Image (tube, rainbow, N blue to C red):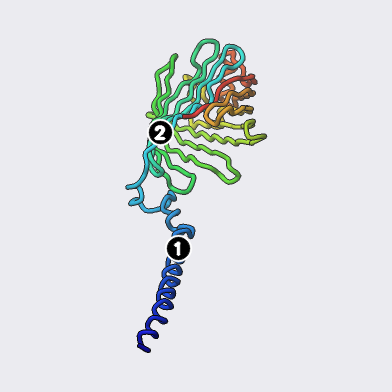
Amino acid sequence: MKNFLLVAAIAPACALADQDEHQHHHMQHDHHDRSPAPAVSNLEHAPNQPDHVMDHEVLLTKVTIDQLEAREHDGSALEGSLWFGGDFNKLWLKTEVEREEGETEKAELQALYSRAIAPYWDLQLGARHDFELETDSRNWGVIALNGLAPYFFEVDTSLFIGEDGESAFRVEAEYELLLTQQWILSPEIEVNFFGQNSPEQHTGSGLSDIEAGLRLRYEFTPQFAPYIGVNYEKKFGNTADFARQEGESVSETLWVIGLHAWF
């Protein structure tokens, strides 16, 4: 009888201890589940991780219209891109078209394979085709480096190698200054160099031309933003000489109005 009373007194205490221990483990387990994920899991999506991570990549498509605008003196321009792929590998299509007084002054299309080589930087290889109306169209091989430089400058550098050994180099840079959540001021610049004189194409060796723009856009949504701005172009060196021989101006400043969109 004495032993029975002792067991009866100890049993509830043991049960209470087991319950406390269970709750303690549950809290530890719960705390473990709620703790931040290890840093390594986040790094699995970084561009510099091994290729096996690509097995879980999600393929996406993005169309960007950087500029769809009307310019002074019956001019217009279109600049945009389309890419398809994942974090590491993409297929890029880029195009630029400029028209003046009803005639196409410049039209090109690039098809590139893009590979992420570092966070925010892609190496791109492919081909460019120039649609020439007055002369034969030209094809170029392309080696490009595209990415986000320090202080959030978007940079695109391209080396072009022509079919007959011609060479050209282009540097583009753009920055977005957020005045408010909707108003964004975007300065940009494009500089072109050529390795040889090409009177037929009206391009000279060395620094050929600079195009700079300043556009102020209002984002009704991040995907839809009309803008107004100003665009400045100037030719240099032999390219300027070719322009003078044709009776063309070597510099021009134009007001523009257009649309920036992506989807």
The residue lying toward the viewer, choosing from 133 and 203, is 133
Residue located at (39% from left, 41% from top): 86
> Crowding at label 1, few (<14), some or many (≥20) Cα neighbours within 10 Å?
few
Instruction: Point out which mark residue 61 bears.
Output: 2
167 shown above or below 149: above
The residue lying toward the viewer, choosing from 148 and 199, is 148
- Quadrant in which the N terminus is drawn: bottom left
Of helix, strand and loop, which one carries label 2? strand
255 shown above or below 194: above
Q: Residue furthest bottom?
A: 2
Q: Position of residue 71 (x, y in %)?
A: 59, 17
Which of the two labelled residues, at mark 2 and mark 1, occupies the earlier sequence position? 1
145 shown above or below 71: below
Q: Position of residue 147 (x, y in %)?
A: 50, 41
Q: Position of residue 178 (x, y in %)?
A: 64, 36
Q: Are marks 2 and 1 in contact (CB under 8 Å)?
A: no
Q: Which residue is mark 1?
A: 32
> Crowding at label 2, few (<14), some or many (≥20) Cα neighbours within 10 Å?
few
What amino acid type is highlighted by mark number 2?
Thr
The residue lying toward the viewer, choosing from 226 and 243, is 226
3 shown above or below 180: below
Q: Position of residue 151 (x, y in %)?
A: 60, 44
| Distance in Å between CA atoms under marks 2 and 1 | 37 Å
Residue located at (48% from left, 27% from top): 80
Residue located at (50% from left, 31% from top): 194
What amino acid type is highlighted by mark number 1?
His
- Report which quarter residue 230 is drawn in: top right
Of helix, strand and loop, which one carries label 1? helix
Residue located at (40% from left, 25% from top): 129
| 2 vs 1, front mark | 1
